[in-house]
Amino acid sequence: MEEGLFHLVDKVIIVVYFAAMIGVGVLLYNRMQSFDDFLLAGRKMTAPLLVCTLVSTYYGLGVLLAGSEISYESGVVNWFFDTAPAYVIILVTALVLTPKIRGRDFRSVPDIVHAHFGLPARVATALASFIYSLPAFSIMGLGGLFVLLFDIPFGWGLVLGSAVALIYTVLGGLMAVVLTDTVQFVLMAVTLAVAAAIGVSLVGGVEEMELVLPDHFLPTGGRPASLLFVYGMTSLSVFIEPAFYQRIMAATSRRAIVVAMIVGVSLWMSYDWVITMLGIAAHTAEIQGIVSAPSGPDQAVTHFVIRVLPVGLTGLFAAGLAAAAMSTLDSYLLISSTNLIYDILNPLRGGKMSDVSLLRWTRVTLVVSTAANIGICLLFGNVERLWIFITAILICTALVPVMAAFYWSNVKRRAGQAAALTGFGLVVGYYLLTGIAGVWDEAAYAYIWSGRIFAWDVTLNQDYGILFILPAVIVTFIAAQLLPGGERE
Amino acid sequence: MMLVYRIWTWTAIALLAFGSIAVFVVVFVTTFRQLRGGKNLDDTARLK
């Protein structure tokens, strides 16, 4: 994307949007009477609100950019293998796990783990959840958008973009997050739908796209089965996704959750397919000479859409992009701050923090988390590959203890602790080993470490760690459960 | 297969645009009624 893409009208639309978001936080500030009001919106979240917040939280700028990049390069495989497995898991979670998650007065995933396996397992799960919830990609996307809009340095773009989300989240907690998510949800959905209708028509429709790029319409996209399997496995994170759990806990009823999931999945399927078609349309338009080549495949859809939309709609689309980033950023900022204060600090102090103290310190930590995220963005510059790491650490640390807590009666405390600590330790160790001692392999598009472990020559691909760490965690859990002795929960 | 892709593409576009507006209208009405102290749409199922 180049400078000068936005008209003054577009910029005014975006400034009005940001002001409205901050206004929501200001309006809700006096309604935050307790920590439950702040963290779980007083547990009064209805089905329509749940739909908006679930759909918009999951569909951040990361999904939009990554999804459009994959579909630009490989086509419909993005929909069939990167997103479709998650729909199944979301529906299973809504129908099967909801009664367990809402069974007791839990406030977070570490709460569930602590109740069954004690403090060490809680701290490991809270740290995994904290790492998973770092919204670095959203902050980077927002920073980049501010650079384009207002022609300011990237660092200031990061600060200004995240400051808007931070202000209304600090003031209004989850209710502010949910209400702003609602506006953000409709903004991003409608602008993408309009952009897709114009974009697909402009290149001659789906049939023309298939004539220009026939391989892009193969469901497997020519990818190796092992890679398809790894991407499918990252969908397991939905089983223990912190934002997902928080919203299930905050809902008014189980019926509200099931309705929200069914409506949400139909919207997610549409959203993913529309992005996939936009990615292929952008590539087609480039081959047809309708638009110039983007600076990178991740920019393909935004570059294409901003070129084809008229003034005014471009501003709404940019606001939709900001909405996609902010709806994810605010939710995960809230969760990562909760992980540090409610899930780690409060239990370490013997659970003696008062409601007022929890509320105040969570608000303070929101500022600290935002600052830490801005630091990470400035330090690393590109966090796209962070996705598999943060998903792996959450799945390997929390999945086995949480499922055991729900479905294994008479489980031993040490089994859950061993599983959580082993998962956390192995993922961190594996990524350090492959990241620091490994070398970048362009063909594999991953860090590869080759060396000897005991008597064996071993080659490790950084992205494939989850394939054997998760089974190792399950074996550790079963061994700790079967060995004699140990306290049962 | 291309016919399925074409139908699904336009269905997805329509669902995304009109579905999101419909949900937004319901949220707006619900929140407005809540703020006026009126009955919430999900009051019957409320736990607290």
Image (cartoon, coloured by chain):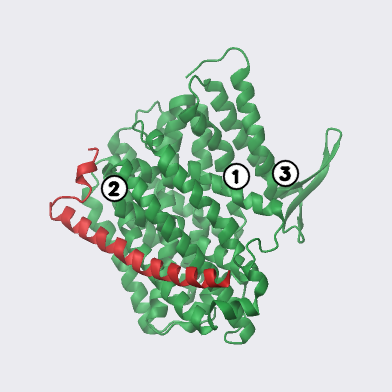
Chain colours: A green, B red
Q: Position of residue A67 (x, y in %)?
A: 55, 64
Of label 3 and label 2, which has the lower sequence position? 2
Does the CB distance between marks 2 and 1 fall below 8 Å? Answer: no
Label 3 element class: helix
| Amino acid marked by disc 3 | Leu
On screen, residue A314 above or below A376? below
Of label 2 and label 1, which has the lower sequence position? 2
Q: Please tell me in which quadrant of the rendered image residue A8 appears.
A: bottom left
Q: Residue at x 65, y 60 (%)?
A: A220
Residue A240 seen? yes
Q: Nearer the viewer, residue A127 or A317?
A: A317
Please identify, in this view, whether the residue under mark 1 or under mark 3 is nearer the observer. Answer: 1
Q: Please tell me in which quadrant of the rendered image residue A470 appears.
A: top right
Which label number is shown at residue A433?
3
| Amino acid marked by disc 2 | Met
For this view, does A271 lie left or right of residue A484? Answer: left
